[in-house]
Image: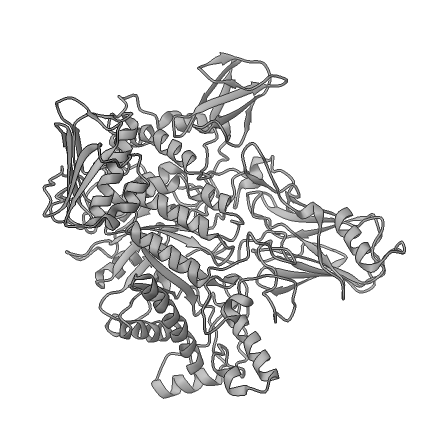
Amino acid sequence: MSRFIRTHRFCLVSAALLTVTLSAPVQAAQPAAPQAALDRFASEAGYSITFVKGATEGSFNTRLDLTLPKSVPAANWSVYFGSVHPLTVVGDSVFDLIHVNGDNYKLTPKPGAILKAGETYAITFAGHEPTEFQALPNAYVVAEGLKPVVIATSKTRFDPATGLESEPFVTPITDEATVKKAPTDANEWLTPERAFVQNASRTVAQAKPDIVILPTPVSAKHLSGPPLNLAKGINVKLSGLSLADIKAALDESHLKQTSGGLPVEITIGAGQTTGQTTGQTTGQTTGKPESYHLLAQDGRIAITAVDAAGAAYAIASLSQQAAFEHDRLKPIEISDAPRFGFRGMHLDLARNFHSKAFILQTIDQMAELKLNRLHLHLGDDEGWRLAIAPLPELTEIGSHRCHDLKEDHCLMPQLGAGPEGSKIVDGYLTKADYIEILKAAQAHHIEVIPSFDMPGHSRAAVRSMEARYRRLMAEGKPDAANEFRLQDPDDTTVYDSIQHYDDNTLNVCIPSTYHFIETVLDDIRDMHAEAGVPLKTYHIGADETAGAWTNSPACQALVKEKGLDPAHMTPYFITQVSQILGRKGIEPAGWSDGMGHVKPEDMPKTVQSNAWGGLFGGGVAEAYRHANRGWDVVMSTPDVLYFDMPWAVDPKERGADWAARSVDLFKVFAFMPENLPANASVMTDIQAHGETIADSEPLIEGRKIAGMQGQLWSESVRSDDIASYMIWPRLLALSERAWHTGAWEPPYVPGRSYSYGDRQVDGKALLADWQSFTDRLTPRLAELDRDGVFYRLPTPGARVTGGIFEANLAYGGLKIQYRTKGSSWRTYAGATAVKGPVEVRSIAPDGRRYSRIVTVQ
């Protein structure tokens, strides 16, 4: 699933938490009040990160430069910073590096080291990551008895023109070789010149579409007759459904509701839709859930839908087309139904919190794109984000970060939170918040799937319950203290999780763990009941367990009693929790790596598996294997559907890159979720090499993929706007593939293999469909502007050849602006003569925001 890092081979310094305990002699400090001296130190110290060449050809390291102020505190002091990647010091240094936990490190001067005020000390770490945004901000200084203070030079900034966050403490990467991750890495930095060529290669000269509905309907055609005047609004009459079923869709549509408006009859019935055959779907929509038929002609509009969701989707389609035609709607007939029953988006609130307002905005936008599942990741190592009434410690402690070494009041700062956390990265959903979200989602025909990752990725829960234990023991209440404890106190197992925690895993062998889980589930189920939205699916997580419990006496006894495999206790846990869920009438879901080890016969009848194996790393076989078990497999492929990956191979683009060096809009659009091996024809692996994907475990006849889900993991996503930047407009392309099968997608043939460039995918048809999609993006981006969504504006491709400047865009049909040195911004209208370097940017449809600036010579 996310996981910012996936293997121990990645190594980059980031700036969130590392403990630099400077107990060695330091040049005499000026007399000052202790807190004032520490404050001054934080305001004057220098802090910077630079990527430098390593000792071997083609290798690069990361250097942290710490400059001491001319005046330093008299008392011993420390600097905390962190890294989501493991750190190893290279060469001699006056500091020793100690890993504390997770992304926390401790840097201490070696015995006898003399640190001089005003000097810069360079500490070099092995390896680096090829973007400027994997560094974490808010390093801070502490001294015993004083308030910790963030080092000013480690803070981020925001550009008012673009709204984008920058990290001024990171030295800009200018050497393209620095972005290589290995000598065999064939990725090229997407310079403006290369982007220009790439954009041009994907552009097709064809008539612009006159039907702009996204996602693409199964069938849509204009009819003869005069246009329908929607300027006075619509007058809706309902049969078989209530106004509440479609009120949200009507309220958010372009159309006004008035008694004197154009008649719109909406009926729940059998449907009359028979679309064209595309790919491996029949196009038949009659009777399919969420399907609809719309006929607008002769001064009236008739909508027949199979269910209320289909009626709401018909309104969304009508609204898009009517807005495009300025309320003079040409007669039109639409027959439509979804490709998949599961069309989802996953939001990680655990690593860094995202607000209720952001979640509600996302629900609104998802509904317009006919997406119907919202997976909320509410608990992980770094945070617990939903109030659970019987266990207030989960949010009192687990939702907040501060400098508390004992973690009695909060979790230690992580992921750049700083010593006091912040209202941006800290926080949780109250019961009222969650119920409001549930009701909003239900009104938009979206199911909310809550998730607290277990048994690994559970440090926030573990530490919160340990703090509860210590408090109750101090109060002389041992029974209450042990009631919800998640660790075996006699367990001496030493382990290292994928994010380098040594205490993030629930003990799966003690009764209090399952009592805890049932208590959490019952409280969530009660919230759903109060909202009038039954809890249907709960996501266990169940991925990346660190291999704990080996030396737990409780586990050793359970293994002996039940004849279990001590090395594979996670399947036991998943089975136990799934059976608990089954007894409560809740369907279990989990990430595919954990789910793959359970015995299907021990699981409930309905199981959801989020397939997150890489396309070129066994993920295809895993997805089909799980589908062959009869499970609902939801494609969550990280190479394509992890929206925390960078938009491009460019050090200025933020994101993790363990799964993909870039996930651009075209890649999401071109994904083939049902014929997974076929993706090898049009996609390369993480090192930009063409490969072959063999269908080694074919789908059994009658088995199929259940859906698609986009994922946003939030390790480096510290604000709602950054989250939006990473999601949009990629979610538009996901909705297109989840709803509509492209005519260019080859039908799945069991056992067939595909190789890069083998032409088994119709490239011309793919590009024609892509062109149609991008032509329809412009009105959608304008809608995002009106709704206040902070989406990514594409950086232009550009080149200067023989003094002639040219520019283009990957998508969106937006305006491009350029300027030369000393000149003002001008709108690009075509190739033009220039002298000297040229700066280029795109502009949002509403003219209020700009893309990141790129420069060509």
Scheme of colours in the image: one colour
Closest to the observer, 828 or 374? 374
Taking the image as shown, residue 268 lies to the left or right of residue 697, namely left
Q: How many marks?
A: 0
Closest to the observer, 470 or 546? 470
Q: Is residue 350 visible?
A: yes
Identified at 36% across, 36% down, the residue is 666
Percent across and percent down for residue 453 are 42, 65
Percent across and percent down for residue 471 are 59, 79
In the rendered image, which quarter contains the C terminus?
A: top right
In the current view of this chain or complex, which residue is farthest to the front?
A: 259
Q: Is residue 504 visible?
A: no
In the rendered image, which quarter contains the N terminus?
A: bottom left
Percent across and percent down for residue 184 are 48, 43
Taking the image as shown, residue 778 lies to the left or right of residue 546, namely left
Taking the image as shown, residue 829 lies to the left or right of residue 326, namely right
Closest to the observer, 520 or 157? 520
Percent across and percent down for residue 306 are 15, 48
Q: Quadrant of residue 324?
A: top left
Against 56, residue 498 (above or below) is: below
